[in-house]
Image (tube, helix red, strand yellow):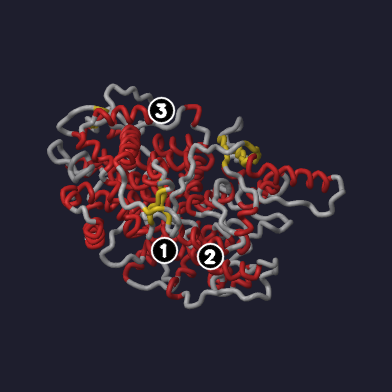
């Protein structure tokens, strides 16, 4: 069934990026979940009944251009395509698209919540190099999100446990899961900016491999600023649980204990409350570690329930939000060491899915997702980490996961060979100490799989079997990074201005002076936001993806941008020859984007409703699993366009020159004269 309203109106659904052979892989299963299980996601029957062909309620390029439910189908297709782009590249710029889609679709407005995710990316890129151990958590969270979708899609036992817990089934259950699993997975690590300063101080003393005990450490005080509960907007919480709470610590302890009290754990509501109270202020009681999960849950709680007056409300349900928050606060050390202790030799109690399905899935996926994570910390950069993981879901018993972690043989080959040699020496008793090579040794000979089975009960969802394998092969360079680099590009800001560049084209064309452009950019920011918010999700993403592609275009013409002052010639404008290279490349990006979203070539009086465009390639054959537009196809089609249409692919480039410097402090340089 998939995109029912979109297909009803146009006869097309958008390119499917997987086939039957792919549906048991990570990408195929995750995309199939969005396309095949989430039918009618966010549909509104009342609005559908109010509409007529002369009075549509959905937006495309403008309001009231298409049916409301068709817009919601297009939004879901945007999410599917965004996740596909990320799973192909693993790049943080593509992870951004997934965050953006989720926030726009389920929380209400990216502009109001952007800081909680952008802060994580900025802190990691800027501050993590001072740590001994630290790896990426921004792209990591999107991988965790995809893993959870794939497991729900392929594991009947988990689906049944989730659906029983929330009393729903079918497409409604899948939509419910997408909503609250997205909230849980994408935001489970947003509290890392609180943990990073703590780790930076600790790392100062760890340089000489000293233990943390007896050294200076940070602790957080005045936590009531973050955790206290008061105000009219908390009445619903009291009504839901039949009790008033003075702090989030009380609230979280109550909810967690309510779910786990019959699980056989040696806990009380008071013991959970004590752990939560002391985590930020007494890290010495928790092995000198600061728990980012505690801060993630509290920061997200404030954003979801303590919005300032006048900010938009989301459509999220209170109880399910609390389930997401308690899953987040449990996923790191609270469950593993305060509720149970999975490191003890005696038998521990792994979490069952029917006690807290969101917490179960988060802890499972958080453990499995350890590939393709940028190593920031000093020791982390020296370790061997998997660059990829090949998942096969549903083995012969119907519930298994085979996860083959892939190591780059070119980069890590010598280290792996050295480790294997030392391991054989240890086995033959010619070496006293057992060698380690994290994470390779843990996966091949260590505790990786055993730890997962101690944390979550794999038998409770039909005997889920996690089979860990490893391999080494040459790294795929298809999705390369470019020389252009900033610690976190302000993609949202760039998209705002790019849209304004189109809507105010005549004004832009009259401003040839760079100072005038900068002045105009500075003084129109609020207007940019209002104009941008009028767009549908599809057109917002189109502007974002145009901004992202700028690094690729610069690479093609021998230029790059950086925040550093370097000994290269600064670029203040592009030459005609450079624009001739950029134009067809931008046209190629636009063509691919349109075909992925179900557009075709044609002329019509209702371009948005029919999803046809005269600048697409005529008579192009598009199969069920899509088409990849080549540079040659794009250039040939670009050359048939008139100059006015061609200029649409090159005019934004001078706009980007001004934006990079103003919004990110970046400058563009030319590698050659």
Q: Nearer the viewer, residue 71 or 583?
A: 583
Give the left or right position of residue 313, taking residue 605 as reference.
Answer: right
According to the picture, the residue beneath numbered tag 1 turns out to be: 301
- Cα distance in 3D space between marks 2 and 3: 43 Å
- For residue 333, above or below residue 393: below
Residue 267 coordinates in the image, percent (x, y): 60, 64
The mark that comes first in sequence, 1 or 2, is 2
The mark that comes first in sequence, 1 or 3, is 1
**Residue plotted at (34% across, 22% down):** 621
* Callout 1 secondary element: helix
Give the left or right position of residue 432, taking residue 54 as reference.
Answer: right
According to the picture, the residue beneath numbered tag 3 turns out to be: 625
The mark that comes first in sequence, 2 or 3, is 2
Quadrant in the picture for the N terminus: top left
**Residue plotted at (54% across, 59% down):** 330
Give the left or right position of residue 665, taking residue 205 as reference.
Answer: left
């Amino acid at each position: 069934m998939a995109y029912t309203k979109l297909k009803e109106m146009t006869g097309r659904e958008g390119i499917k990026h997987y086939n039957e052979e792919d549906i048991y892989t990570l990408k195929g299963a995750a995309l199939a979940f969005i396309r095949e299980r989430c039918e009618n996601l966010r549909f509104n029957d009342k609005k559908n009944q109010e509409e007529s062909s002369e009075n549509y309620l959905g937006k495309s390029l403008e309001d009231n251009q298409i049916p409301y439910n068709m817009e919601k189908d297009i939004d879901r297709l945007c999410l599917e395509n965004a996740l596909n782009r990320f799973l192909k590249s693993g790049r943080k710029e593509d992870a951004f698209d997934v965050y953006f889609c989720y926030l726009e679709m389920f929380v209400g407005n990216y502009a109001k919540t952007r800081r909680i995710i952008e802060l994580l990316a900025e802190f990691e890129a800027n501050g993590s190099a001072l740590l001994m151990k630290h790896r990426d958590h921004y792209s990591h969270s999107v991988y965790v999100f995809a893993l959870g979708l794939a497991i729900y899609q392929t594991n009947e036992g988990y689906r049944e446990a989730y659906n029983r817990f929330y009393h729903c089934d079918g497409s409604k259950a899948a939509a419910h899961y997408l909503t609250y699993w997205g909230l849980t997975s994408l935001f489970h690590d947003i509290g890392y900016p609180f943990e990073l300063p703590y780790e930076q101080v600790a790392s100062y003393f760890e340089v000489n491999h000293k233990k943390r005990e007896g050294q200076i450490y940070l602790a957080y005080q005045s936590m009531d600023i973050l955790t206290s509960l008061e105000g009219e907007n908390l009445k619903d919480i009291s009504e839901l649980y039949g009790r008033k709470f003075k702090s989030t610590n009380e609230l979280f302890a109550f909810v967690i204990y309510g779910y786990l009290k019959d699980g056989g754990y040696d806990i009380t509501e008071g013991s959970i409350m004590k752990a939560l109270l002391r985590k930020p202020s007494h890290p010495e009681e928790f092995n000198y570690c600061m728990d980012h999960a505690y801060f993630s849950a509290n920061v997200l709680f404030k954003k979801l329930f303590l919005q300032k007056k006048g900010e938009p409300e989301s459509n999220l349900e209170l109880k399910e939000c609390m389930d997401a928050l308690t899953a987040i606060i449990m996923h790191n050390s609270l469950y593993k060491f305060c509720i149970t202790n999975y490191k003890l030799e005696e038998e521990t109690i792994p979490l069952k899915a029917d006690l807290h399905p969101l917490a179960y899935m988060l802890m499972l996926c958080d453990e499995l997702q350890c590939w393709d994570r940028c190593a920031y910390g000093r020791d982390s950069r020296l370790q061997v980490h998997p660059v990829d993981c090949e998942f096969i879901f549903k083995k012969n018993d119907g519930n298994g996961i085979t996860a083959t972690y892939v190591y780059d043989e070119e980069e890590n080959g010598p280290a792996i060979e050295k480790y294997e040699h030392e391991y054989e020496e240890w086995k033959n008793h010619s070496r006293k100490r057992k060698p380690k090579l994290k994470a390779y040794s843990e996966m091949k000979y260590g505790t990786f799989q055993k730890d997962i089975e101690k944390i979550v009960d794999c038998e409770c969802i039909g005997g889920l079997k996690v089979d860990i394998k490893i391999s080494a092969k040459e790294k795929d360079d298809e999705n390369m990074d470019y020389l252009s680099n900033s610690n976190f590009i302000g993609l949202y800001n760039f998209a705002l201005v790019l849209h304004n560049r189109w809507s105010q084209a005549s004004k832009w064309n009259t401003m040839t002076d760079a100072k005038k452009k900068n002045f105009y950019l500075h003084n129109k920011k609020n207007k940019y936001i209002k104009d941008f918010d009028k767009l549908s999700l599809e057109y917002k993403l189109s502007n974002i993806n145009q901004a992202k592609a700028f690094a690729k275009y610069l690479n093609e013409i021998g230029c790059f941008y950086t925040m550093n002052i370097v000994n290269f010639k600064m670029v203040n404008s592009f030459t005609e020859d450079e624009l001739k290279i950029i134009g067809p490349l931008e046209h190629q990006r636009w063509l691919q984007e349109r075909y992925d979203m179900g557009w075709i070539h044609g002329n019509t009086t209702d371009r948005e409703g029919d999803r046809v465009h005269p600048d697409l390639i005529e008579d192009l054959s598009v199969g069920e699993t899509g088409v990849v537009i080549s540079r040659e196809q794009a250039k040939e089609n670009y050359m048939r366009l008139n100059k006015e249409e061609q200029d649409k692919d090159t005019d934004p480039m001078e706009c980007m020159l001004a934006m990079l410097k103003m919004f990110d402090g970046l400058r563009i340089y030319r590698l050659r004269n």
